[in-house]
């Protein structure tokens, strides 16, 4: 994230209110598999839509931005 000096004077009251929303998900499995040569594991937990972590390295990030 780039430094933005115009935000230095903001207070907590100036920030937008974010609310968690829950959506019913019809995923078939909690396990996600991959066969990529640059990833050193073959299974992981399926990152569901709407994750609030927003990890920069997450391949599912475009689905929850």
Image: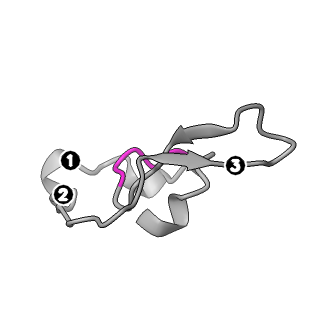
Q: Nearer the viewer, mark 1 or mark 3?
A: 3
Gap in Å between the C-alphas at discs 1 and 3? 44 Å
The residue pinned by badge 3 equals 34
Circle number at residue 14: 2
**How many residues crowd around disc 2 within 10 Å: few (fewer than 14), some, or many (20 or more)?**
few
Distance between the alpha carbons at the discs numbered 3 and 2: 43 Å
In the visual, does 20 lie left or right of 30? left
- Element type where label 2 sits in the image: helix
Query: Is residue 1 visible from the viewing direction of this image?
Result: yes
Relative depth, front residue between 3 and 49? 49
Residue range in magenta is 51-55
Q: Pointer 1: residues within 10 angstroms few (<14), some, or many (20+)?
A: few
Residue at horizontal 47 percent and vertical 48 percent from the top: 46
Frontmost residue, 11 versus 1: 1
- Label 1: which secondary element: loop
At horizontal 52% and vertical 59% (from top left) the residue drawn is: 61
> Where's residue 29, x and y in %?
42, 53
- Main SS of the magenta part reads loop
């Amino acid at each position: 994230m780039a430094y933005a000096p115009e935000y230095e004077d903001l207070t907590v009251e100036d920030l937008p209110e974010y609310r968690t929303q829950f959506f019913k998900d019809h995923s078939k499995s909690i396990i996600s598999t991959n066969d990529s040569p640059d990833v050193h594991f073959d299974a992981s937990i399926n990152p569901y839509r709407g994750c609030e972590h927003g990890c920069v390295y997450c391949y599912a990030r475009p689905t929850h931005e």
